[in-house]
Image (spheres, grey):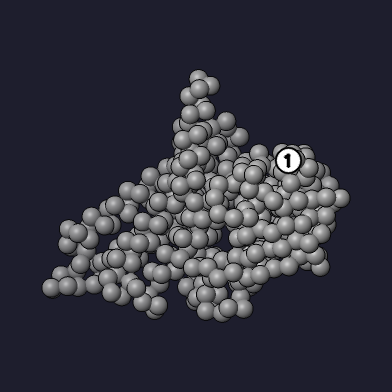
Amino acid sequence: MDFDYTDDQKFLKGEARRFLEGHCGVAVVRGVLNDPAKSYDEALWKAVAGQGWLGAAIPEAHGGLGLGHIDLAAIAEELGRALAPIPFASTVYFVAEAILLAGSDAQKAAWLPKIAAGEVIGCFATNERAGALTEAQVQARVEGGKLTGVKIPVTDGDAADLAVVLAKDGARASLFLVDLHDAAVARETLQTLDPTRGVAKLTFTGAPAERLGEAGEGLALAEQVLDRAAVLLAFEQVGAADRALEMAKAYALERYAFGRPIGSYQAIKHKLADIYIKNELARSNAYYGAWALESGAAELPIAAAAARVAACEALWFAAKENVQTHGGMGYTWEVDCHLFYRRAQQLGLVAGGAKAWKERLVAQLERRNVAA
Protein backbone atom coordinates (compact mmCIF):
# COMPACT_ATOMS: atom_id res chain seq x y z
CA MET A 1 0.00 0.00 0.00
CA ASP A 2 1.40 3.41 -1.04
CA PHE A 3 1.04 6.08 1.65
CA ASP A 4 2.57 8.85 -0.48
CA TYR A 5 0.98 11.67 -2.47
CA THR A 6 0.11 11.06 -6.11
CA ASP A 7 1.89 13.09 -8.77
CA ASP A 8 -1.10 15.46 -8.99
CA GLN A 9 -1.08 15.94 -5.23
CA LYS A 10 2.66 16.58 -5.25
CA PHE A 11 2.07 19.22 -7.92
CA LEU A 12 -0.68 20.80 -5.81
CA LYS A 13 1.62 20.79 -2.79
CA GLY A 14 4.43 22.41 -4.78
CA GLU A 15 2.13 25.11 -6.12
CA ALA A 16 0.83 25.76 -2.61
CA ARG A 17 4.39 26.22 -1.36
CA ARG A 18 5.24 28.66 -4.12
CA PHE A 19 2.04 30.62 -3.50
CA LEU A 20 2.66 30.86 0.25
CA GLU A 21 6.30 31.83 -0.22
CA GLY A 22 5.01 34.80 -2.20
CA HIS A 23 2.05 35.70 0.01
CA CYS A 24 2.95 34.49 3.52
CA GLY A 25 6.51 35.41 4.34
CA VAL A 26 7.63 35.89 7.91
CA ALA A 27 6.69 39.58 7.67
CA VAL A 28 3.04 38.59 7.29
CA VAL A 29 3.21 36.36 10.38
CA ARG A 30 4.96 39.04 12.41
CA GLY A 31 2.47 41.62 11.16
CA VAL A 32 -0.30 39.79 13.00
CA LEU A 33 1.91 39.01 16.00
CA ASN A 34 2.86 42.66 16.47
CA ASP A 35 -0.61 44.17 15.98
CA PRO A 36 -3.01 43.55 18.91
CA ALA A 37 -5.91 44.70 16.73
CA LYS A 38 -5.35 41.89 14.21
CA SER A 39 -6.34 38.28 14.86
CA TYR A 40 -5.52 37.13 11.32
CA ASP A 41 -4.24 38.49 8.01
CA GLU A 42 -7.24 39.48 5.91
CA ALA A 43 -5.29 39.85 2.66
CA LEU A 44 -3.88 36.33 2.98
CA TRP A 45 -7.33 34.96 3.83
CA LYS A 46 -8.79 36.48 0.66
CA ALA A 47 -5.86 35.23 -1.41
CA VAL A 48 -6.22 31.69 -0.07
CA ALA A 49 -9.96 31.81 -0.78
CA GLY A 50 -9.15 32.90 -4.31
CA GLN A 51 -7.03 29.77 -4.73
CA GLY A 52 -10.06 27.63 -3.88
CA TRP A 53 -8.31 25.94 -0.95
CA LEU A 54 -11.17 26.59 1.47
CA GLY A 55 -13.36 24.39 -0.67
CA ALA A 56 -10.80 21.71 -1.52
CA ALA A 57 -12.77 18.93 0.18
CA ILE A 58 -16.20 20.50 -0.34
CA PRO A 59 -18.23 18.93 -3.19
CA GLU A 60 -18.59 20.90 -6.41
CA ALA A 61 -22.37 20.93 -5.89
CA HIS A 62 -21.78 23.18 -2.89
CA GLY A 63 -19.23 25.49 -4.48
CA GLY A 64 -16.07 23.54 -3.63
CA LEU A 65 -13.37 21.94 -5.74
CA GLY A 66 -14.55 18.41 -4.92
CA LEU A 67 -11.01 17.09 -4.53
CA GLY A 68 -10.54 15.07 -1.37
CA HIS A 69 -9.05 15.01 2.09
CA ILE A 70 -5.60 13.92 0.91
CA ASP A 71 -5.46 16.95 -1.38
CA LEU A 72 -6.54 19.08 1.58
CA ALA A 73 -3.81 17.44 3.66
CA ALA A 74 -1.20 18.49 1.10
CA ILE A 75 -2.40 22.09 1.39
CA ALA A 76 -2.47 21.84 5.18
CA GLU A 77 1.16 20.76 5.26
CA GLU A 78 2.21 23.89 3.40
CA LEU A 79 0.01 26.15 5.53
CA GLY A 80 1.73 24.71 8.59
CA ARG A 81 5.17 25.22 7.07
CA ALA A 82 4.34 28.90 6.43
CA LEU A 83 2.75 29.39 9.89
CA ALA A 84 -0.17 30.95 8.01
CA PRO A 85 -1.94 33.40 10.38
CA ILE A 86 -5.47 32.72 9.14
CA PRO A 87 -8.51 30.85 10.57
CA PHE A 88 -8.19 28.07 8.00
CA ALA A 89 -8.20 25.14 10.43
CA SER A 90 -11.22 26.28 12.44
CA THR A 91 -13.24 27.01 9.30
CA VAL A 92 -12.25 24.05 7.14
CA TYR A 93 -11.14 21.20 9.41
CA PHE A 94 -13.82 21.77 12.04
CA VAL A 95 -16.86 23.71 10.83
CA ALA A 96 -16.96 22.59 7.19
CA GLU A 97 -16.30 18.99 8.25
CA ALA A 98 -19.08 19.17 10.86
CA ILE A 99 -21.56 20.42 8.28
CA LEU A 100 -20.44 17.82 5.72
CA LEU A 101 -20.77 15.12 8.36
CA ALA A 102 -24.08 16.03 9.99
CA GLY A 103 -25.69 18.91 8.12
CA SER A 104 -29.05 18.73 6.38
CA ASP A 105 -29.28 19.47 2.67
CA ALA A 106 -30.54 22.96 3.53
CA GLN A 107 -27.67 23.60 5.95
CA LYS A 108 -25.09 22.42 3.44
CA ALA A 109 -26.60 24.60 0.73
CA ALA A 110 -26.69 27.61 3.06
CA TRP A 111 -23.18 27.45 4.50
CA LEU A 112 -20.76 25.38 2.41
CA PRO A 113 -20.70 27.70 -0.63
CA LYS A 114 -19.98 30.66 1.67
CA ILE A 115 -17.18 28.77 3.40
CA ALA A 116 -15.66 27.76 0.07
CA ALA A 117 -15.77 31.37 -1.12
CA GLY A 118 -14.14 32.71 2.05
CA GLU A 119 -17.27 34.68 2.97
CA VAL A 120 -17.69 32.92 6.31
CA ILE A 121 -15.18 32.22 9.05
CA GLY A 122 -16.08 29.40 11.41
CA CYS A 123 -15.14 28.21 14.88
CA PHE A 124 -15.77 25.05 16.90
CA ALA A 125 -17.02 25.78 20.42
CA THR A 126 -17.14 22.71 22.64
CA ASN A 127 -15.12 23.21 25.81
CA GLU A 128 -16.16 25.16 28.88
CA ARG A 129 -13.28 24.32 31.21
CA ALA A 130 -10.06 22.35 31.33
CA GLY A 131 -10.21 18.58 31.02
CA ALA A 132 -11.46 15.92 28.65
CA LEU A 133 -14.61 16.66 26.66
CA THR A 134 -17.46 14.74 28.30
CA GLU A 135 -21.23 14.97 28.54
CA ALA A 136 -20.92 16.10 32.16
CA GLN A 137 -18.65 19.00 31.18
CA VAL A 138 -21.34 20.57 28.97
CA GLN A 139 -23.35 23.18 30.86
CA ALA A 140 -24.48 25.34 27.93
CA ARG A 141 -28.15 24.71 27.16
CA VAL A 142 -30.61 25.24 24.32
CA GLU A 143 -34.25 25.77 25.23
CA GLY A 144 -36.85 26.83 22.71
CA GLY A 145 -34.18 27.26 20.06
CA LYS A 146 -32.20 29.74 22.23
CA LEU A 147 -28.65 29.06 23.44
CA THR A 148 -27.41 30.13 26.86
CA GLY A 149 -23.93 29.41 28.21
CA VAL A 150 -20.22 30.10 27.95
CA LYS A 151 -17.55 28.48 25.76
CA ILE A 152 -13.85 28.98 26.50
CA PRO A 153 -11.34 28.88 24.91
CA VAL A 154 -12.62 29.08 21.33
CA THR A 155 -9.92 29.25 18.66
CA ASP A 156 -10.72 31.98 16.10
CA GLY A 157 -13.85 32.84 18.06
CA ASP A 158 -12.86 36.50 17.97
CA ALA A 159 -13.06 36.61 14.17
CA ALA A 160 -15.67 33.95 13.35
CA ASP A 161 -19.06 34.52 11.78
CA LEU A 162 -20.45 31.05 12.47
CA ALA A 163 -19.94 28.68 15.39
CA VAL A 164 -20.64 25.01 15.79
CA VAL A 165 -21.55 24.75 19.47
CA LEU A 166 -21.96 21.73 21.72
CA ALA A 167 -24.84 22.28 24.15
CA LYS A 168 -27.40 20.33 26.16
CA ASP A 169 -30.75 19.88 24.46
CA GLY A 170 -32.70 18.14 27.18
CA ALA A 171 -30.69 15.46 28.98
CA ARG A 172 -28.15 14.92 26.18
CA ALA A 173 -25.81 17.20 24.25
CA SER A 174 -26.32 18.14 20.60
CA LEU A 175 -24.46 20.27 18.08
CA PHE A 176 -25.89 23.63 17.01
CA LEU A 177 -25.12 26.25 14.39
CA VAL A 178 -25.02 29.78 15.83
CA ASP A 179 -24.65 33.11 14.04
CA LEU A 180 -22.05 34.98 16.08
CA HIS A 181 -23.20 38.37 14.85
CA ASP A 182 -26.43 38.04 16.84
CA ALA A 183 -26.88 40.59 19.62
CA ALA A 184 -27.17 37.76 22.17
CA VAL A 185 -23.53 36.76 21.61
CA ALA A 186 -20.67 38.46 23.46
CA ARG A 187 -16.98 37.91 22.71
CA GLU A 188 -13.92 38.50 24.82
CA THR A 189 -10.53 38.18 23.16
CA LEU A 190 -8.07 36.15 25.21
CA GLN A 191 -4.29 36.47 25.37
CA THR A 192 -2.34 33.35 24.43
CA LEU A 193 1.23 32.36 23.67
CA ASP A 194 0.53 32.54 19.92
CA PRO A 195 -1.29 35.79 19.03
CA THR A 196 -1.17 34.86 15.32
CA ARG A 197 -4.16 32.60 16.04
CA GLY A 198 -7.01 34.39 17.80
CA VAL A 199 -8.78 32.88 20.82
CA ALA A 200 -11.96 34.10 22.50
CA LYS A 201 -14.44 33.51 25.27
CA LEU A 202 -17.97 33.33 23.85
CA THR A 203 -20.98 34.10 26.03
CA PHE A 204 -24.46 33.27 24.75
CA THR A 205 -27.54 34.84 26.34
CA GLY A 206 -30.44 33.47 24.35
CA ALA A 207 -28.79 33.35 20.92
CA PRO A 208 -30.79 31.61 18.16
CA ALA A 209 -29.41 28.09 17.60
CA GLU A 210 -30.15 25.61 14.81
CA ARG A 211 -29.52 21.95 15.53
CA LEU A 212 -26.82 20.25 13.45
CA GLY A 213 -27.39 16.51 13.25
CA GLU A 214 -29.69 14.42 15.39
CA ALA A 215 -30.71 15.36 18.92
CA GLY A 216 -28.54 13.82 21.62
CA GLU A 217 -25.73 12.85 19.25
CA GLY A 218 -23.63 15.95 19.87
CA LEU A 219 -20.77 14.32 21.75
CA ALA A 220 -20.45 11.45 19.26
CA LEU A 221 -20.50 13.90 16.34
CA ALA A 222 -17.97 16.17 18.05
CA GLU A 223 -15.61 13.23 18.47
CA GLN A 224 -15.96 12.35 14.79
CA VAL A 225 -15.17 15.95 13.84
CA LEU A 226 -12.16 15.91 16.15
CA ASP A 227 -10.87 12.73 14.47
CA ARG A 228 -11.08 14.40 11.07
CA ALA A 229 -9.52 17.63 12.29
CA ALA A 230 -6.73 15.78 14.12
CA VAL A 231 -5.51 14.23 10.88
CA LEU A 232 -5.46 17.54 9.04
CA LEU A 233 -3.85 19.36 11.95
CA ALA A 234 -1.16 16.66 11.99
CA PHE A 235 -0.17 17.70 8.47
CA GLU A 236 0.11 21.34 9.56
CA GLN A 237 2.32 20.21 12.42
CA VAL A 238 4.50 18.10 10.15
CA GLY A 239 4.92 21.01 7.75
CA ALA A 240 5.97 23.35 10.57
CA ALA A 241 8.30 20.73 12.07
CA ASP A 242 10.03 20.23 8.72
CA ARG A 243 10.59 23.96 8.38
CA ALA A 244 11.99 24.16 11.92
CA LEU A 245 14.44 21.37 11.05
CA GLU A 246 15.52 23.23 7.91
CA MET A 247 16.13 26.38 9.96
CA ALA A 248 18.19 24.50 12.52
CA LYS A 249 20.26 22.77 9.84
CA ALA A 250 20.91 26.00 7.93
CA TYR A 251 22.09 27.78 11.08
CA ALA A 252 24.27 24.83 12.11
CA LEU A 253 26.06 25.01 8.76
CA GLU A 254 26.66 28.77 8.81
CA ARG A 255 27.48 29.33 12.50
CA TYR A 256 31.15 28.79 13.32
CA ALA A 257 32.63 28.00 16.72
CA PHE A 258 36.31 27.28 17.33
CA GLY A 259 37.01 27.53 13.63
CA ARG A 260 34.45 25.05 12.34
CA PRO A 261 30.66 24.93 11.65
CA ILE A 262 28.71 23.91 14.74
CA GLY A 263 26.98 21.34 12.57
CA SER A 264 30.23 19.38 12.52
CA TYR A 265 29.98 18.73 16.26
CA GLN A 266 28.42 15.47 17.31
CA ALA A 267 25.98 17.04 19.80
CA ILE A 268 24.40 19.18 17.06
CA LYS A 269 24.32 16.26 14.63
CA HIS A 270 22.41 14.23 17.21
CA LYS A 271 19.90 17.06 17.73
CA LEU A 272 19.18 17.32 14.03
CA ALA A 273 18.97 13.54 13.62
CA ASP A 274 16.51 13.28 16.51
CA ILE A 275 14.30 15.97 14.96
CA TYR A 276 14.37 14.17 11.64
CA ILE A 277 13.36 10.84 13.19
CA LYS A 278 10.41 12.35 15.04
CA ASN A 279 9.31 14.23 11.93
CA GLU A 280 9.35 11.09 9.80
CA LEU A 281 7.44 9.12 12.43
CA ALA A 282 4.82 11.87 12.54
CA ARG A 283 4.66 11.95 8.74
CA SER A 284 4.01 8.21 8.49
CA ASN A 285 1.23 8.44 11.06
CA ALA A 286 -0.25 11.46 9.29
CA TYR A 287 -0.27 9.57 5.98
CA TYR A 288 -2.03 6.65 7.65
CA GLY A 289 -4.60 9.03 9.09
CA ALA A 290 -5.17 10.67 5.71
CA TRP A 291 -5.73 7.28 4.10
CA ALA A 292 -8.26 6.34 6.80
CA LEU A 293 -10.04 9.68 6.45
CA GLU A 294 -10.18 9.58 2.66
CA SER A 295 -11.38 5.97 2.50
CA GLY A 296 -13.79 6.16 5.43
CA ALA A 297 -11.96 3.28 7.07
CA ALA A 298 -13.04 1.93 10.43
CA GLU A 299 -9.47 2.52 11.67
CA LEU A 300 -9.93 6.33 11.55
CA PRO A 301 -10.27 6.86 15.33
CA ILE A 302 -7.04 4.92 15.96
CA ALA A 303 -5.22 6.47 13.00
CA ALA A 304 -6.31 9.98 13.97
CA ALA A 305 -5.18 9.55 17.58
CA ALA A 306 -1.81 8.15 16.50
CA ALA A 307 -1.33 10.99 14.02
CA ARG A 308 -2.25 13.57 16.64
CA VAL A 309 0.10 12.21 19.29
CA ALA A 310 3.07 11.82 16.93
CA ALA A 311 2.58 15.23 15.31
CA CYS A 312 2.27 17.08 18.63
CA GLU A 313 5.48 15.49 19.82
CA ALA A 314 7.32 16.15 16.55
CA LEU A 315 6.51 19.85 16.27
CA TRP A 316 7.13 20.59 19.95
CA PHE A 317 10.48 18.80 19.80
CA ALA A 318 11.52 20.42 16.51
CA ALA A 319 10.59 23.89 17.74
CA LYS A 320 12.41 23.40 21.04
CA GLU A 321 15.56 21.97 19.47
CA ASN A 322 15.56 24.67 16.80
CA VAL A 323 15.81 27.26 19.58
CA GLN A 324 18.58 25.25 21.25
CA THR A 325 20.55 24.86 18.02
CA HIS A 326 20.47 28.62 17.54
CA GLY A 327 21.92 29.03 21.03
CA GLY A 328 21.71 32.49 22.59
CA MET A 329 20.38 33.90 19.31
CA GLY A 330 17.47 31.45 19.34
CA TYR A 331 15.80 33.12 22.32
CA THR A 332 15.71 36.60 20.81
CA TRP A 333 12.70 38.33 19.31
CA GLU A 334 14.55 39.04 16.07
CA VAL A 335 15.19 35.36 15.25
CA ASP A 336 12.15 33.46 13.99
CA CYS A 337 12.55 30.38 16.21
CA HIS A 338 9.94 31.60 18.70
CA LEU A 339 7.30 31.75 15.97
CA PHE A 340 7.51 27.97 15.59
CA TYR A 341 7.60 27.42 19.34
CA ARG A 342 4.44 29.52 19.71
CA ARG A 343 2.65 27.64 16.94
CA ALA A 344 3.73 24.28 18.40
CA GLN A 345 2.00 25.17 21.65
CA GLN A 346 -1.11 26.45 19.87
CA LEU A 347 -1.52 23.46 17.58
CA GLY A 348 -0.78 21.14 20.48
CA LEU A 349 -3.92 22.32 22.29
CA VAL A 350 -6.40 23.39 19.61
CA ALA A 351 -8.07 19.95 19.36
CA GLY A 352 -7.18 18.74 22.83
CA GLY A 353 -3.74 18.08 24.24
CA ALA A 354 -1.49 15.14 23.43
CA LYS A 355 -2.19 13.55 26.84
CA ALA A 356 -5.91 13.34 26.11
CA TRP A 357 -5.20 11.88 22.67
CA LYS A 358 -2.85 9.27 24.17
CA GLU A 359 -5.66 8.20 26.48
CA ARG A 360 -8.04 8.17 23.53
CA LEU A 361 -5.62 6.04 21.53
CA VAL A 362 -5.30 3.50 24.35
CA ALA A 363 -9.09 3.37 24.74
CA GLN A 364 -9.55 2.76 21.00
CA LEU A 365 -6.94 0.01 20.97
CA GLU A 366 -8.54 -1.69 23.99
CA ARG A 367 -11.95 -1.48 22.33
CA ARG A 368 -10.56 -3.00 19.14
CA ASN A 369 -8.85 -5.83 21.04
CA VAL A 370 -12.06 -6.67 22.93
CA ALA A 371 -14.01 -6.76 19.66
CA ALA A 372 -11.41 -9.06 18.12
Q: Quadrant of residue 147?
A: bottom right
Q: In this figure, what is the number of numbered marks?
A: 1
**Residue 345 visible to an observer of this rendering:** yes
- Residue type (three-letter) at the residue carrying disc 1: Arg
Q: Quadrant of residue 186?
A: bottom right
Most distant residue in the right direction? 144
At 42% across and 42% down in the image, what residue appears? 284
The answer to which of 53 and 313 lies nearer the viewer is 313
- Asked which secondary structure carries label 1, the reply is strand
In the picture, measured across the screen, residue 3 lies left or right of residue 46, that is: left
Q: Quadrant of residue 183?
A: bottom right
At 49% across and 46% down in the image, what residue appears? 356
At 63% across and 70% down in the image, what residue appears? 189
Residue 323 location, x and y as percent?
Answer: 33, 67
**Residue 108 visible to an observer of this rendering:** no
Q: Relative to residue 297, is residue 180 depicted above or below?
A: below
Residue 156 location, x and y as percent?
Answer: 63, 63
Residue 321 location, x and y as percent?
Answer: 32, 61
Q: Relative to residue 325, is residue 138 depicted above or below?
A: above
Q: Relative to residue 106, is residue 152 depicted above or below?
A: below
Most distant residue in the left direction? 258
**Residue denoted by label 1:** 172
The answer to which of 290 and 353 lies nearer the viewer is 353
Most distant residue in the top direction? 372
Packing grade of label 1 (10 A; few <14, some 14-19, many >=20) is: some
Residue 203 location, x and y as percent?
Answer: 71, 63
Q: Relative to residue 65, is residue 220 depicted above or below?
A: above
The answer to which of 264 and 161 lies nearer the viewer is 161
